[in-house]
Image (cartoon, rainbow, N blue to C red):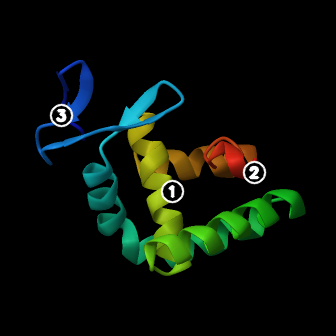
Amino acid sequence: MQGIVLKEGAPWCNRHSMGHKVFDNRSVCIGCVEEMAEENEIRGHKLLEETRNILSVADLKKLNDYLQMSSLDLGRRQPFCFVRLLATEALLSNTSVGGIMRKIRKERSISEILPSTFV
């Protein structure tokens, strides 16, 4: 979990000695996101396939578009990029990757966790 402090008025992670990235009035340490994503990477393929199987055609297209762009930007495979997306939302929501997956299963949607440019 993130150890958030304010440094010069901005959210700061002491653990990673870096500022937070802000998303819609919420912030997250990218170092913490990367750690959580690495911890859950082995589950990435399974979680991605499960999610793809429950989404509507419209949400599936949005997810695939996001993963294609994210994979190119990060130089990582799509399952890792998906877990990184889950980790980002988990930390922003103060929950776990499993908690975000439960929400996706219940709502059968990923619209709330995708960046606004993909919604």
Under tag 3, what secondary structure?
loop
* Amino acid at the residue labelled 2: Arg
Asked whether disc 2 touches disc 1, contact meaning CB atoms under 8 Å apart, the reply is no
From this view, report whether residue 28 is shown above or below residue 43. Answer: above
Amino acid carrying label 1: it is: Leu
Q: Is mark 2 on a helix, strand or loop?
A: loop
Identified by mark 3, the residue type is Gly
Report which residue position mark 2 lands on.
108
Classify mark 1: helix, strand or loop: helix
Sequence-earlier tag: 1 or 3: 3
Q: In this view, does 68 lie to the left or right of 98?
A: right
CA gap, disc 2 and disc 3: 32 Å
Q: State left or right for residue 28 relative to residue 115.
A: left
The image quadrant where one finds the N terminus is: top left
Q: Residue at image x 54%, y 29%?
A: 24
Residue 95 seen by the camera: no
Q: Which residue is drawn at 66% across and 41% down?
A: 112
Q: Name the residue under label 1.
A: 85
Return the residue nearer the eye: 107 or 74.
Answer: 74
Rendering quarter of residue 75: bottom left
Q: Mark 3 points at which residue?
A: 3
**First along the sequence among labels 2 and 3:** 3
